[in-house]
Image: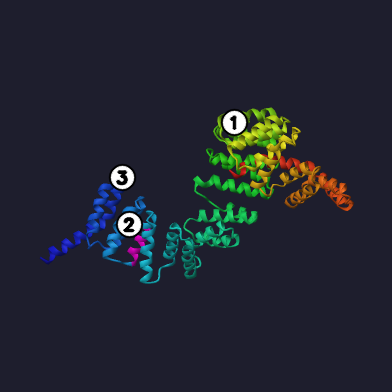
Amino acid sequence: MTFVIFWLVCLHSLQAASAPDLLDGYLASGDLRAAGELLDRLAADPKVPLEVARAIGAACVRRGQPGLAARYLVRVAARNPQPLLLADLASAQFLAGEFAGSAATLDAMARNGRLAPALVSLRGLAALQLGRRAEAVRHFRNALAADPEEGTANFHLGTLAADAGELRDAIRHFEVAARTYRDRYAARYNLALALYRAGRWQDGVNVLEKISPDPAAAGEVENLLAQGYDKLDRVREAVEAYQKAIRLDPKNPAYVFDLAVMALRRRTYDLAEVVLESGVLSFPQDRNLALALGGTHQLRGQMEKAQQLFQRLASAHAKDPLICVYLGNSYFEAGRFEDAVAAFTRGIDLDPENSVLYYQAAVSLVKLGRETDPRVRRFLGKALELDPKLAQACYQLAKIDSESNPARARELLARALRLDPELSEAHFLLSRLCRQAGDARCAQAALRRYEALRARERDRLERDRVKGILFTLEKR
């Protein structure tokens, strides 16, 4: 009789030990019903050993079913509240998106004893997912107090610091996370981003050059490397890195765009045109690439070609105000001011919160000799209301008031020059107004400043043309 009992106990142990493999087979084949029934039987069995119960939960998580793991473990842990089971339960609940449940499990564990640093970090993650940022930060800091090298806490404190613009703290945390966080690639990539934002381009490049990402992420690393090389004036390496990013991820138009933007900023318009023409062929539905190509035609003096492209885009995207900006600018540069006014006012109808459209429409009317058109002052006022830092709008209003209200004009010029001290035309107008007012000293100082700025005016104007073409696309 004793032998029979011993044999039955051994048989039960063998069956329990094989349960994780049986469950894994069900999950691998997608038979969730059979898996659920097996889990219910196992959860009802008080004789399943602790290590087997944990292996069952791990099998569910490994097969992408953390919800099943949580459902099983919550029943087992209720009967046998071992810390290891509770830790597995909290992790499974978090992975299943049951953040409140995970937090409650961890809170109960914390009341019964000190948590390991990794579990304190998990407590912080749950709080973060529940929108309790201050609580999350407190948990992460507590984790670091127990273990300064804890990877999860360092990574997420780095992320929070970066979001808040606290780059020194972000870099400090990411540097630790790059050594200890489970996802070393994510830690190093974010470290490089923080270093770039802090202006430490060489340090960021050094980090990226040592990354060995998953092949699926290799393109984004090369693209970020290229941006660093560009800032360091290592142009050949930047071009090569952008090209490599495009080869590694040929379905991502952002890499094509970034290479073209670099070429435009460096005024290598021929390279930009080649890159963008290829990009538009590969991604015919990408509006930003098409706009950048049209802008490149414009920078090369190919106004008709640019306008034809913008007109096609306007027909295809009739409710896109940004296309109106680009079409209007191309008309403006070509001296077609009536068409420019029409394009800009169409854009205003589509996007009444865009300061650039109001400003450009007003200047186009001025170019037509319609300074007295009531829309000019209204458009300029609206542009300043939407963008109080728009120095050019202050200057245009000063020009309008220069004859009828010179005192008001000087106030506007002072505001314009506070916003942009290098606005040469404002210095010239100020010189004239000072001379008319009998203020020779002011007139001479303003004229000297104007002449100094004019010496490099051509370069500034070309830079402003490029900036004007890229101003919104880079914020896409």
Residue 48: give x, y in percent of width and height.
24, 61
Q: Which mark is residue 30?
A: 3
Q: Mark 3 vs mark 1: which is more N-terminal? A: 3
Element assignment for label 1: helix
Q: Which mark is residue 314?
A: 1
Three-letter amino acid code at disc 2?
Ala
Way the structure is coloured: rainbow
Q: Residue 248: within the magenta? A: no
Mark 3 and mark 1: span between their CA atoms? Answer: 49 Å
Which of labels 3 and 1 is toward the front? 1
Mark 2 and mark 1: span between their CA atoms? Answer: 53 Å
- Would you call the spot at circle 3 few (<14 residues within 10 Å), some (14-19), or many (20 or more)? few
Which of labels 2 and 1 is toward the front? 1
Element assignment for label 2: helix
| 27 versus 76 height, above or below | above
- The dominant secondary structure in magenta is helix
> For the magenta stretch, what is the residue range?
83-92
Three-letter amino acid code at disc 3?
Gly
Question: Which residue is under mark 2?
Answer: 70
